[in-house]
Image (cartoon, grey):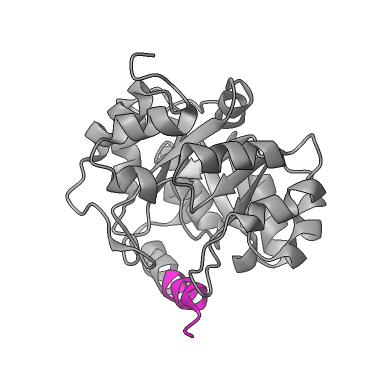
Amino acid sequence: MTDVLENIVAHKRHEIAAAKQCRSEAELKSRMADAPPVRDFTGSLQDASGMGLIAEFKKASPSAGIIRAEADPLSVATIYEQHGAHCMSVLTDEHFFGGSLDDLIAVRNAVSLPVLRKDFLLDTYQVYEARAAGADAILLIAECLDDCRLRELFFLTYELGMDALIEIYDPENLDRVLRLSPELLGINNRNLKTMVTSLDHTTGLAGRIPSETLLISESGIKTRDDVLRLQHAGARGILVGETLMKSSDIGAKIDELLGHSPSS
């Protein structure tokens, strides 16, 4: 089967090279001075009563195809905030996910929630790009980064005041990620090489996560029972995108997942 992640990373390297031709890293650094102050992404999840929710805005994905092509980021973000999401994630990859940094900027200006840039970050350029756009946190995917680059991007993120959610799928990456003592660690239930999804992936690895690291379960979360199962296993946060974006009533779906009554 085609290695989807490998294809995405190869395409992303070309995108980064092209972006650098259009705007220098020095220019991005200068633009950071005008970026809005960083909001506390980790703190918002830590303060959650029950399961913390990172609600994701995305229009498409390699696994699901077109999800909600004409979705308005401002409308969706407002619903997420009104129904109790603790943070937001915005897909900024255009080629595979139909997103953009403009979506992130729009969302960051529309709501008070901390916002994560979700993309395939491989270069310091993208970290500066994220902060210049107003991101409060970024996603770092361990499968895409060797030890040296992971450390470089991780520490740069915190130098810029943002938080880093480090994501793994392959259990072999767990120990090298934990050596960084991350505040946030995401376990992706979707194998990015095959696109097969199983919540067993989080429940099987949760016991290896130290209590001081906040465990986030990502992908394949569809029902309240799923949330309770993950919470019982030790997850303290969930990242949910496709389930919300496909729902005919996004607000009601958030209420269901978080166990809220419709009027709460």
Judge whether 45 appears above or below 128 on screen: above
Give the prevailing secondary structure in the magenta stretch: helix
Residue 74 appears in the figure: yes
Residue 18 image position (x, y, % from top left)? 37, 69
Any magenta on residue 3? yes
Please give the range of residues in magenta.
1-13
Pick the residue in front: 245 or 134.
Answer: 245
Judged from this view, the residue extending furthest toward the top is 264
Judge whether 218 appears above or below 11 on screen: above
Which residue is drawn at the image coordinates 51% and 77% (left, top)?
A: 6
Q: Is residue 43 left or right of residue 73?
A: right
Residue 146 image position (x, y, % from top left)? 69, 68
Residue 219 image position (x, y, % from top left)? 50, 53
Which image quarter: residue 34?
top left
Any magenta on residue 43? no
Which image quarter: residue 123?
bottom right
Judge whether 259 appears above or below 189 on screen: above
Judge whether 64 appears above or below 228 on screen: below
Residue 86 appears in the figure: no
Pick the residue in front: 218 or 182.
Answer: 218
